[in-house]
Image: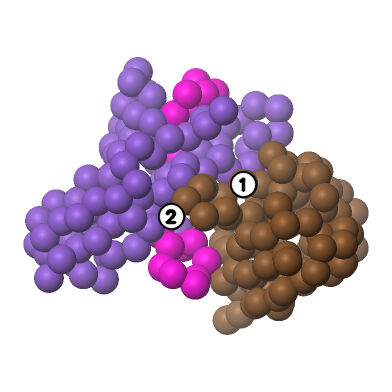
Amino acid sequence: DQQVKQNSPSLSVQEGRISILNCDYTNSMFDYFLWYKKYPAEGPTFLISISSIKDKNEDGRFTVFLNKSAKHLSLHIVPSQPGDSAVYFCAASGNYGGATNKLIFGTGTLLAVQP
Amino acid sequence: NAGVTQTPKFRILKIGQSMTLQCTQDMNHNYMYWYRQDPGMGLKLIYYSVGAGITDKGEVPNGYNVSRSTTEDFPLRLELAAPSQTSVYFCASSYSSLNSGNTIYFGEGSWLTVV
């Protein structure tokens, strides 16, 4: 069963516009969420995170929103730049039964920012 | 600043062969992980370790073994390679458990093909 879901395999946006990447989760025990960015032939790199005690976290052009009641989070990138073109993974962990040691990943969304 | 280093980068194995993927980190992190990523899928946790001498299974441990004799090194062993183990393997590390404020740092990946 896929506990973390990214239902959009790909997204294409114009440079300068907003990119919105979505993520849904099913496990209510998750309390920490992260977004990773991955370029081809490289390892994922950490982008931004949010704890379940917050509903928004912002870092420069990147903002993550968390809706706990809907078990949904989203990553907003504004303005989008061609260098943002990559695969974005949503990941979650939880403070239960050793789960703080594990990240559960979604399947990723390929973002293409068109110049 | 090396971070997490994996070797080899690429390897082709024949069915039934054995090999070890090496991983070392120089950040003095206590926790280390092995993930695999199949095409179109998210990263799946194979094994993890919370410190030297301690290892535990992740989501997909079958067909693999690990050891953690030092803080720096976390090798992944494939004993009898099977085509289902064709994947990209990522080693990662974190200072402590994955609650708020922590993240994991990934190596660049090892591409393994079993034929």
The colouring scheme, among rainbow, by chain, secondary structure or one colour, is by chain
Q: Name the residue under label 1.
A: B44
Q: Mark 1 lies on which chain?
A: B
Residue span colored magenta: A25-45
Label 2 – label 1 distance at C-alpha: 14 Å
Which secondary structure, mark 1?
A: strand
**Residue at 87% over, 62% down:** B16
- Chain painted brown: B
Which corner quadrant holds the C terminus of chain A?
bottom left
Which corner quadrant holds the N terminus of chain A?
top right
Q: Residue A6: x, y in percent?
A: 38, 39
**Residue at 82% over, 53% down:** B64
Q: Name the residue under label 2.
A: A36
Q: In this view, does B42 lie above or below B6?
A: above
* Residue type beneath disc 2: Tyr
Q: Residue A99: x, y in percent?
A: 65, 34
Left or right of residue B2: residue B46: right
Left or right of residue B49: residue A29: left
* Residue type beneath disc 1: Lys
**Quadrant of residue B81 within the rendered picture:** bottom right
The residue nearer to you, when weighing A103 against B100, is A103
A37 in magenta: yes
| Residue B72 numbered tag | none
- Chain painted purple: A
Q: Is residue A22 above or below residue B48?
A: above
Q: Mark 2 lies on which chain?
A: A
Left or right of residue B31: residue B42: left
